[in-house]
Image (tube, rainbow, N blue to C red):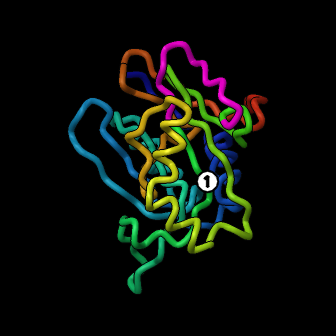
Amino acid sequence: MKNINVDIKMLRAHISFIFGSLSTPVLWTFIKENGGGAFTKLGTVDELQDTFNKAQNKGYGIHFCPNTFKLEADGSIKKSPENVVAVNALWVDWDKKDNKLYTPIARAASCQTKGRGGFHKFWLVERSQRKNPALIQAVKDGLMYSLAMSTNSDPAPTNIHSNIRVAGSYNLKDTNNPVKVMFQHNFVSYQYT
């Protein structure tokens, strides 16, 4: 595998768009693309910039949870549905070959990321509603699963604490052909040089 550098500007744009800030600690999961484990880290984009590049060059995909977790007294996070304190976005994972997701709700998505064969669509939650207990409970009770079923997308990553691949990183499932995950806001692609 060739040396890979994460597109940090694109990654920052994606995280800033979802969380509304780059100062929010994000729960990151680094998953070995072809088996071999995973590890998690809590931190901001700026704090983990070196970790992103090192992980990618060791074959790890970079994923994050778009929702916000309660911090424990020691500064750690327990990744569980009970510890989600804010729903920042809803999402679907569309892995179909034809890349067509033509339902009205899908066309209304706030942004999307596009990678190897499919894409993730995100619907941002209004800031004033992100900590709404009824919304948090609805997502825990299967709101995103219903969204996935209504859009004929993958029902697997629909838990309130699921991980999604971050834009600016590379999909390394084929190590000989890394594919950059692109970020699109209102379907205008952000390209950085």
**Farthest residue, direction bottom:** 73
Which amino acid type corresponds to the residue marked 1 in the rendered image? Ala
The residue that appears at 66% across and 40% down in the rendered structure is 10
Q: Is residue 57 left or right of residue 16?
A: left
How far across and how far down the image is residue 116, in percent? 49, 21
**Farthest residue, direction top:** 98
Q: Foreground: 19 or 161?
A: 161
The quadrant of the rendering that contains the N terminus is top left
Query: Which of the 4 image quadrants contains residue 61?
Result: top left
How far across and how far down the image is residue 44, in percent? 56, 61
Q: Foreground: 49 or 141?
A: 141
Q: Local crowd at mark 1 within 10 Å, few (<14), some, or many (≥20)?
A: many
Q: Foreground: 120 or 148?
A: 148
Query: Which of the 4 image quadrants contains residue 21?
Result: bottom right
How far across and how far down the image is residue 169, in percent? 52, 36
Q: Foreground: 48 or 181?
A: 181
Q: Mark 1 highlights which residue?
A: 89
Magenta residues?
Answer: 93-105
The residue that appears at 40% across and 60% down in the rendered structure is 41
The residue that appears at 70% across and 51% down in the rendered structure is 17
Does residue 142 belong to the magenta stretch?
A: no
- Residue 2 in the image: above or below residue 169: above
Does residue 100 belong to the magenta stretch?
A: yes
Q: Assign a secondary structure to mark 1.
A: strand
**Farthest residue, direction left:** 36
- Residue 112 in the image: above or below residue 51: above
The residue that appears at 23% across and 44% down in the rendered structure is 37
